[in-house]
Amino acid sequence: MAVMWLNYIFCHICVKVWSPNEIKSLKKDVGIIVCILEKKFPPTFFDIMIHLLLHVVEELNVCELVHSHWMYPIERMMKVLKGYVRNMSQLERSMVEGYVLDETMGFVTKYLQEFQHVSKRIWDVEEEEGMVIEVLEGVIEKVVFNSILRNLAQIMC
């Protein structure tokens, strides 16, 4: 029952619309719940987080709604950013590069799926009859590969 009552308290703390008249009864309920939990659980269960529950209820008067000053979403985003770190000497740079890469991949997968896929390869294994050279485009000058250079490039890769 105490855990269910604790859930009830958290539901009332995290609501988006609340009445200031409920704070007194909420403070009383939190005190009773902590006392009941002290009877049921060992002393190692009680750390600063249980004590913090008393102060969260008192902060409702000062800061009003919890979701407007809650740090949980920011801490979750910091965990994501810390996961992008690959170079410990340049933490911020790694975070930015990882975030930009993640956003870019999100853009590519979301918005470019509607385009038609073209599966033309530059170096095709099965050549058509009469095709002896290929042209590699995308650089300033066109580079012409004959079959010997193309085979050498495939071996090198």
Image: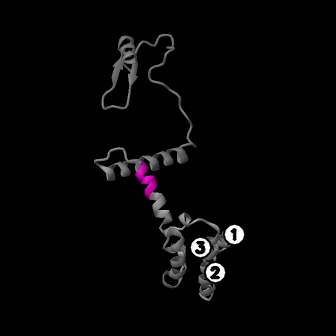
Mark sitting on residue 29: 2
Q: Where is residue 60 in the image (x, y as percent from the top left)?
A: 53, 81
- The amino acid pointed to by label 1 is Met
Q: Nearer the viewer, residue 103 or 96?
A: 96
- The amino acid pointed to by label 2 is Asp
**Side (left or right) of 107 relative to 82:** right
Mark sitting on residue 132: none
Circles 3 and 1: CB atoms closer than 8 Å: no
Q: Give the mark, 3 or 1, whose residue is nearer the N terminus.
A: 1
Magenta stretch, main secondary structure class: helix
- The amino acid pointed to by label 3 is Cys
Q: Where is residue 1 in the image (x, y as percent from the top left)?
A: 71, 70
Mark sitting on residue 14: 3
**Side (left or right) of 15 relative to 69:** right
Report the mark closest to the observer, 3 or 1.
1
Q: Distance between the residues labelled 2 and 3?
A: 15 Å
According to the picture, the residue beneath numbered tag 1 turns out to be 4
Instruction: Indicate the quadrant where residue 30 lies.
Output: bottom right
